[in-house]
Amino acid sequence: MILINCPYCGEREQSEFTNGGEAHVVRPKDPDSLSDKEWGQYVFFRSNPKGIFYERWVHTHGCKKWFNAVRDTSTDTILKIYKLSDRRPEISEFQTTLKSPSGEPIVGSGNFAVKK
Amino acid sequence: MWESPDPKKGYDVIIVGGGGHGLGTAYYLAKEHGFKNIAVIEKGWLGGGNTGRNTTIIRSNYLWNESAHLYDHSVKLWENLSEDLNFNMMFSQRGVMNLAHNEHDIKEMKRRISANRLNGLDTKWLDAKEIKELVPIMNTENLRYPVLGAAFQPRGGVARHDAVAWGYALRSNEMGVDIIQNCEVKSIKTDNYKVEGVETSKGLIKASKVAIVASGHTSVLAQTAGVRLPLQSRPLQALVSEPIKPVINTVVMSNAVHAYVSQSDKGELVIGAGTDGYNSFTQRGGYDVIEETVRAIVELYPIFGKMKMLRQWGGIVDICPDASPIISKCEVKGLYFNCGWGTGGFKATPGSANVFAHTIAKDEPHKINEAFNLERFSDGRLIDEHGAAAVAH
Amino acid sequence: MSSIENSNCNYITNKKIKIFFDGKSYDAFEGDTIASALIRNKIKLIGRSFKYHRPRGIYTCGIEEPNALVQILNEHNEPNTRATIKRVYDGINISSQNRWPSLAFDVGSINNLLSPIFSAGFYYKTFMGPRGFWKKIYEPLIRRTAGLGKPPNNFRSKSIHQNHNVDILIVGGGLSGLIAARKLIDTNYDVLLVEQDSYLGGILKNSNKVDSIDGKKTTDWINETEKLILKSNNIKILKNTLVTSYNFTNHLIALEDKFVGKKIDLDKSELILHKIRTTNTILANGHIERFISFRNNDLPGVMLASSFEKYIHRYGVVPEKNPVIFTNNSSTFSLVKSLIQQRCKPLAYIDARKKEDIEDELKDYLKNHDIQFFPEAEVEGCQGNKEVEKVRIRTNNSIISINSSMLCISGGLNPDIHLFTQSKGLVKWDEKIITFKPNTAFQNTITLGSVSGNYNFHKIFEEVEEKLSFLNINKYVAKIEINVEDDYSITELWETKNDKKSNWSKSFIDLHNDVTTKDLTQAIDEGYDRIEHLKRYTTNSMGTDQGKISSINSLGIVSKLLNKKISEIGTTTYRPPYAPLSFAAIAGRSTYEFYDPERKTPIHNWHVKNHAVFEDVGQWKRPWYYKKHEDETMHQAVQRESKQTRKTAGILDGSTLGKIEIKGKDALEFMNLMYTNAFTKMRPMTSRYALMLGEDGMIMDDGIICKISDKHFIATTTSSGAPKVLAHMEEFLQTEWPHLQVYLNSITEQFTTFNISGPKTREIISQIFTEIDFSNEKFPFMTFKSFNYKNTQVRIMRASFTGELGYEIYISPEHALELWETIFKHGKEFNLVPYGTETMHLLRAEKGYVVIGQETDGTVTPVDINFNWMIGKNKKDFIGKRSLKRSDTAREDRKQLVGVVPLDKSQLIDEGQHIVECENLPKQIKTPIEYLGHISSSYYSPNLNHCISMAMIKGGNKLIGKTLFVSTPSGIKNIPVEIVKPIFIDPENKRLIS
C-alpha cells in the first residue's frame, strides 16, 4: 500500500484516503450554455494517463481535507503533494520514468523481472 | 500452434491487444466476415493481460436488457466454444450464486431475477437453506451480515482462461491471421479523422481499420488518435489458495462482504478482490484490499481459517462511468473500440468479440452492441449496472 | 530411534516425545520438525504426488519443500503443511496426503502408467468429445481427483496484526544479516531483524562452511552477536517469522508463528502478522539450492545436498551414513566434510564439472578419504521401488551402477530473489554463477550475501561494509575464517541424458505439480515457447512451492530446446507471498464480532426488551418490527403496527437518519447549489423536503432541510446515505466553491430522533412539552421549534413520513431514553405503538412517498418520480441541473412512478416483478418478453384491505387508468392490475396538515 503525505496531517497509509480522480477539472460556470456533448465531457470524461497524473485526494479517515497530488501512475510514485490553493506544478518539474510513448517504465511496472 | 511472424507492411484490419477479446475478434472477422488480412498485435505475450489474470467467472444475469442480451449472447457462445474451436475451454457450468446479506440486497436481486426471467435467462432465488445444501461449508448465520438468500444462475460457471486465448489464437492463425507478439503499439496514425495504421516497436504497420482492445491501456492509445474515452484504469486483484480436495461446487459472489470464490480443477480456491480506488498501471494494488477480501472469506467459510494464500496478483481494468462496456466506432473513421469492461470482461469474451467483429466488418454496430456506444455519455442513455447488478464481475 | 546422532547440534534437546504419523506412533526429540523426526525413524515415504500419485519423500530441509506436505489432524485438520518446517510436539497427529486407501498402496498411482494422457496441456486436448461427455463425465472426474490435502475443519483464529515503523529492516539472520546488524548496533537507526528459524545463524548453523568468526567458534559468535543486539537499544529481533510479501513504499508483511514446537493454545494468538514500514530494506535472505532433472529424480531418497547437510547440523540427524553425492558445483564439498566429521562417508562423489575445474583441495580430500570420485560424470537415473535402491552413473560413456538408498544432489545455488522481484526490482543473468541475481532496485532495497549472488562467505564482511557505507554504521570489523574453499564454481547442467525409457520412468522438472522435462519438450513442440505460456500450459512452477528449487532449471532446459540464452527467455513473475500465507493471519482480529461495528441507537436496549426484530441498514441495527407475542409473524406485526398508527399513534426510532449542520455566511447559496430546491424564499424556522442529485442528474439522496436562518441550515439524510452526502458536500465546498464561507458538521450522533405520527400524537406530546402550543395555527406543518426541556435542548419539527399528523423530536442521546419512556407513559391511554422500518415503509407507500434506493436506483430523476415541483427552475444552477436537459434524460416516455392495484383485490403482488402487456407468459421464455418496468414497492395495506404497489414504468404518467399485467415469480399467469396515481391514502393531505 502506498503512503500519502497529507499536507495537513503528515504521512499516512493510502487506505485512510479517498481518491477524487483528475485534478484541475473546473466545473463549468454556466452549464446551460454547454451542448450535451460538452456537458458529458465534464461529467464523465477524465484523463487517464499512464505516467504523470494530476489527481485529487481527500483524507477521509483524518482531517477530511482535499488536496492535490502528482503521481506517476506507471510506478505509483508520488512526485508532489500540494494544497488546493497552491499553484499547479508544471509537468516539466517532474522527471518521468517513462521509456516509450505508451508508457512502459524502465522499472516498476509490467510483468517482467528481466528487461531486454 | 500459432506462428509468430514479422509484421507485414499493412493489413485490412489491425487488432491491438492479444487477449481473449482481441483474438476472438480476429477469429470471428476471419470466420464470419471473410476477412483474410488481419493482424493481432500484442505488447507482451498472448493472454498475458486480464485474460490470464481474472477469476474466470461467467454469467449473464445482468439487470438491464442491453446487458442481459450481450452477456447471454456470450454465454451461448461459451456453451459451444470447445467444439467450435476444437480446444477444451473447460467451461464448467457449475452455477453462479450472488449472496444477499440484507433486505435491500433481497429486493434488488428479486427484481433482477424477474427481469432475467423475462429475458429468457435462468436465474432463480435460493433461500438460506438451499444455499447451505449447495455449499455446506458456508457460514450463513453466525456472521455480522447473515446470508439471507441468493440469486443463482445455473448456466453460469467458470472456464479455463488461458484456453480461451490459445484456442482463438490457434484457429484464427489457421485462417491466416498474423499474431504478432512482443510488439508494442506506440500510437495510432490518423489523417483528417481517418485511420491509417499503427506505429509500433517494429515500425509502421498500415491498415484502414484499427480496433483497440487493450483493456487498461485503451485510453492511453486512444489519446494518440485524439480520442477521449470515459475510462479510468484501476488495479484489480485476485488470489488463489493452496489446492485442497473439492469443497465448493459452485461460484459464490458476495457484494456486501466483498468476496467471490470458486474452486479450480486443480483444487485451488480462486478468490477475487475488489478494485482499488485510484488509477494505476502497475498491476499491483494495495495490500489492504487483499486483507478486506480474505476477512470476508474467513467470515463466510470458517474452514478457510486453516488454509493459506498461495499467490496474489493484480491486473489493470478499465472502468466506465456506468459500469458497462463500450463496443463502438468513434469520430475517427476506421477506428473501433472495445473497452470499459471493468471487472467483468472475461465472461463476455466470445460475445464481445463476435459483435465487435460485426461492428468492424460492417462499420456499424450489431443489434446487440448498439446501446454500448460512446454517445450515451452525451445523451444520457447510460446502462447503469452499478447499483442493480450487485458485484459487477 | 537412537540418540541424537550429531552430538554437537545445539538445537535439539534430548527430551523424547511421541508423534503420530498415519496412525502409528513414533519417538521424536523436542526441536524436531516432522521431517527430521521421520528421518530419525528411517521413514522415507511421506506422500503421493499431485497428478501421478508417485511415492515421494523428503526432498529438502526448509520452506522450498515440494514433496513432503502433510495434514495435521489435531490442528483442525490443517492441510498442506510443510513437514520440513512444522515443528513437532508431544502428541501431534500427522497424516500423509493424496493417497487412497493407504500411502503404501495408492490406487491413484495407476495415473502414472496412464501418464501419456496426462501430459502437457492434457486438459485442453483430451476429455473433449463426444459431445456432452465433458460436462457429464470428464469434468466431474477431473474435479474429484483435484487437490492435495483434505479440507480443514471450522476454525476461529485469534491471530493478530502488529505494525512496525522502522528505519531499517533486515530480512534474514544469517551471516550477512547478522554482520549488518552488528554494524548497526547502537547507531541512530531503529532496526528490525527478522529470522524465519527459531535460531539465528543461517548458513553458520546449517552447514560447516564457515569455521570461525573473529577467532570464535561460529556458535559462540552467533550467541555473542545475539546478546549484543538484545543489549542494544535500537535493534529488535523477531524469530520464527517469515517475510512473505514486499509491497510498494517499503511495506513488508511477515508472519510470526507463536507456537513453534508447541501445541496451540486456542485462547491465545497463534499467529502474528507483522506489517512493517521501513525506510531501507536489507534483504539478506540467502539462497536456495536447485535440483537437477534425471530419470526418477523424484524417488524418496533423493535429497538436496545442502538440505542433507542441514539435517546434520541443525537437527543432529544424519539421513544416511553412506549416500551418493551428485553435483555440478563447488558448494557440496562441505557436505563431504560434514559426513566425515560424523564418521560417515559418501559412497561416491559425482561432479559434472571438468576435472581441471574441480578444486584441488576437494580432489585431495576425496582421495585422502578414499571416496569414489567421478569427475565429468552425471547421474543417469535412479531405480527402486518406493525409494532409491540403485544410482546409475554415466562416466566416460559407460554406466556404473551403485547400490545406495540415498542420493544427494546439487544443481547450483540460486539467490532467493523472490522478495527482491516482488519489490519490483529487476534481476540480471550472471554467466559466472549461472543464475539470476538482483540488478536494479526499485525501492530502497539493499541485497547482502548470497541473495546478491555473493557465495564467497569469506568476502561477506567487505560486501556489507561497502553496501551499508551510505549509512552511519559503527566500526565493527568481522574476520571470517572458512572451512572449505568457497570460490564458487559451477558448470551448467539442467538435465542428464536419459537411457532407460519406460512409462514409469520420469525425469521431473516440477515435483510438486508432476511436470516432467518431456512435458516441456512437448509444449515447445506444440509452440508454447513463451515462458509464461509454457508455465501455464504445463503448470510448471505453479505449485505450492512455486518452483523454488526448479524454476530456473526449467529456464535452462527451455533455453537449450529453443537454442536461446536464458537471459533472453526471462523469468516468469514472482508473485507474493513468498510462501503460502495463512488466511486467518491475513484476516486478523477484524473478523467475527469485530467484522464490522454494529451501530446502535440510544434506545436500542429498549427495543430489545420490547421484542424488536432488527434489520441491518448499513452498520446500523434498526428495529424491523416488534413481536407482540412469540407467535406473531412479521406480517401480523406490521399489519398491527400500521393500523394502530393510523388509528391513534405510532412511534419510530429515527435516530439513524443522517443529520448535517450547515453554517456560515454563504450557507444559503451553498444549499441552493447542493439541492434541487430553492431555499431563498423559504422562511426561517420552516422545513422542506429536498432532493440531492449527482452531477449526472440522478437522485442521490433525500431529506428534510430545516432553515434556521440564511446562515444556518440542518439537513437530514437517509440512514445509509449520511457519510456519502457529507462527503459530497465537502467535496464541492472545498474543491469547487472554496470562496463560500460554509462549515459542515455531522451531528447524526449528537441527536436522537423519534418520529411520532398518527391522529393522537398532538394530544400525547402536548402532555409532555406543556409549554409548547402544538395547535395547527401555532405549529403548522413543516415548521419547527427549539426549546429547553428538562435542561436540555429539544427541537421538534412538524413533519411526517406516514401521511398522518406527525412530529420529529430531536434530543441529546443522554436524555433520549427517558423521553422515549415518558412518551410511552403518556401514550399508553391512546395505545401508542412502536413501529419498525417495515411499517414505516408500508405507511409511506400508502401515502405514495418514495424511498431512495427502492423507487430510485441511480437511474431516476426527480421528474421521473413526479417531483418536478421540487426543482428550483429559477435557479441558475445546482448540481445535476444541466444533466436533466440531455436528450435522453428529458424524454417524456421515461420510466415514471405510478401506483399499481390488482384488479382482484385479494391478490398479492411481489416486489421486483415486472409490468407487461401480456396476460400470460410462455412456459419457457425463449425470446425476451418486452416489459414496461418493475414493481418497486408492494405491501398489503391493512388500512385499505388490499395490495398496493408502486412501480416505475415507461411513460407511466400516460398509463394511469389502464389495465396491465404484473408477472409472478414463476407462474405463467400474470396478475391483471390497474395503473393508478401513486397515492392511496389522503390525497388531499387532510390528515397531514390538520
Image (tube, rainbow, N blue to C red):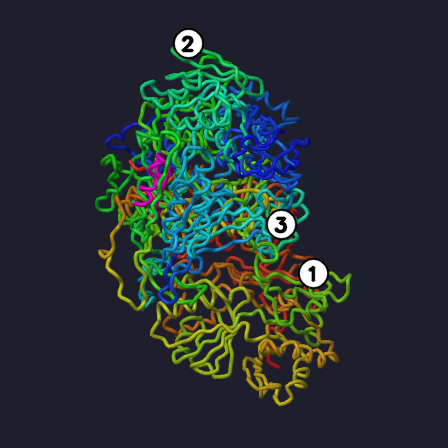
Q: Position of residue B32 (x, y in %)?
A: 40, 31
> Which of the chains bears the disc numbered 3?
C
Q: Is residue B374 visible?
A: no
The answer for how far apart the CA atoms under marks 2 and 1 are is 97 Å
Residue C933 occupies quadrant = bottom right
Give the numbered dot on residue C398.
2
* Amino acid on which disc 1 is placed: Lys
* Amino acid on which disc 2 is placed: Ser
Q: How many marks?
A: 3
> Which of the chains bears the disc numbered 1?
C
Residue C456 located within the stretch drawn in magenta: yes
Q: Earlier in the sequence, mark 2 or mark 1?
A: 2
Find the residue positioned furthest to the front: C215
Q: In the depicted view, which residue is nearer to us: B341 or B353?
A: B341
Q: Same subunit under labels 2 and 1? A: yes
> Which of the chains bears the disc numbered 2?
C
Q: In the depicted view, which residue is nearer to us: C958 or C286?
A: C286
Residue highlighted by disc 1: C905
C928 shown above or below C491: below
Q: How dense is the environment of label 2, judged by Cα within 10 Å: few (below 14), some, or many (20 and up)? A: few
Q: How dense is the environment of label 3, judged by Cα within 10 Å: few (below 14), some, or many (20 and up)? A: some
Apparent side of residue C355 relative to residue C890 in the rendered image (left or right): left
Give the numbered dot on residue C156.
3
Q: Position of residue C1 (x, y in %)?
A: 63, 29
Q: Position of residue C307 (x, y in %)?
A: 48, 31
Q: Earlier in the sequence, mark 2 or mark 3?
A: 3
The answer for how far apart the CA atoms under marks 3 and 1 are is 52 Å
* Amino acid on which disc 3 is placed: Arg
Give the numbered dot on residue B84.
none
Apparent side of residue C650 relative to residue C314 in the rendered image (left or right): right
Q: In the depicted view, which residue is nearer to us: B201 or C474?
A: C474
Tell me the element at label 1: loop
